[in-house]
Amino acid sequence: MTFFNRLGIQSKLLSLVLGVSLLSITLTGLVSYFSGRASMVEAANQQLVSLRNARAEAIKNYFDGLRAHTLTLGYQKMVVDAINSFKPAFDKLEDSKLSPE
């Protein structure tokens, strides 16, 4: 404290202005850091939500396409005949003995 008392008024004012300036710069930096961090976290969350929604839509479209393809195949006579003959053929295979070749 004796060092500060020995200084002139001009040096004391300069020190006071310097201290207030450093304090305001520090506070502005901290506020900017936390605000920027919150903004970046929110942006990352929004990107993840967007990616999730895009993937969900792609999966939905994939299964819709499979469903449409299956319905199309289900109306073809060849597929209907194959399905109808599958059960008796499977039962016949189950009753037969296979040789270990």
Image (cartoon, rainbow, N blue to C red):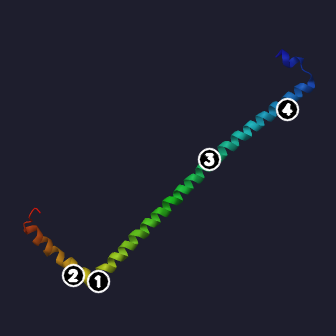
* Residue drawn at point x = 21 percent, y = 81 percent: 81
Find residue 13 and report its image quarter. top right
Q: Is residue 40 above or below residue 14?
A: below
Callout 4: few (<14), some (14-19), or many (20+) C-alpha neighbours within 10 Å?
A: few
The one of 89 and 25 positioned closer to us in this rendering: 89
Identify the element where label 1 is drawn. Answer: loop
Cα–Cα gap, marks 4 and 1: 88 Å
Q: Amino acid at mark 1?
A: Gln
Q: Residue at x 40, y 72 (%)?
A: 64
Tell me the quadrant of the picture where the C terminus can be found: bottom left
Q: Are marks 4 and 1 in contact (CB under 8 Å)?
A: no
How busy is the neighbourhood of tag 2: few (under 14 within 10 Å), some, or many (20 plus)? few
Residue on which the image places disc 2:
81
Q: Are marks 4 and 2 in contact (CB under 8 Å)?
A: no
Mark 1: few/some/many CA within 10 Å (<14, 14-19, 20+): few
Q: Position of residue 97 (x, y in %)?
A: 7, 66
- Residue placed furthest toward the bottom: 77
Name the secondary structure under disc 4: helix
Query: In front of the other: label 1 or label 3?
Result: 1
Lower sequence index among marks 4 and 1: 4
Q: Earlier in the sequence, mark 3 or mark 4?
A: 4
Mark 4 and mark 2 lie on one chain; the one further toward the N terminus is 4
- Give the image quarter of residue 76: bottom left
Badge 4 is on which residue? 17
> Tag 2: residue type?
Asp
Q: Nearer the viewer, residue 97 or 53?
A: 97
Tell me the residue that label 1 is attached to: 76
Q: Looking at the picture, which amino acid does disc 3 mark? A: Ala
> How far is mark 2 from mark 3, CA to CA?
62 Å
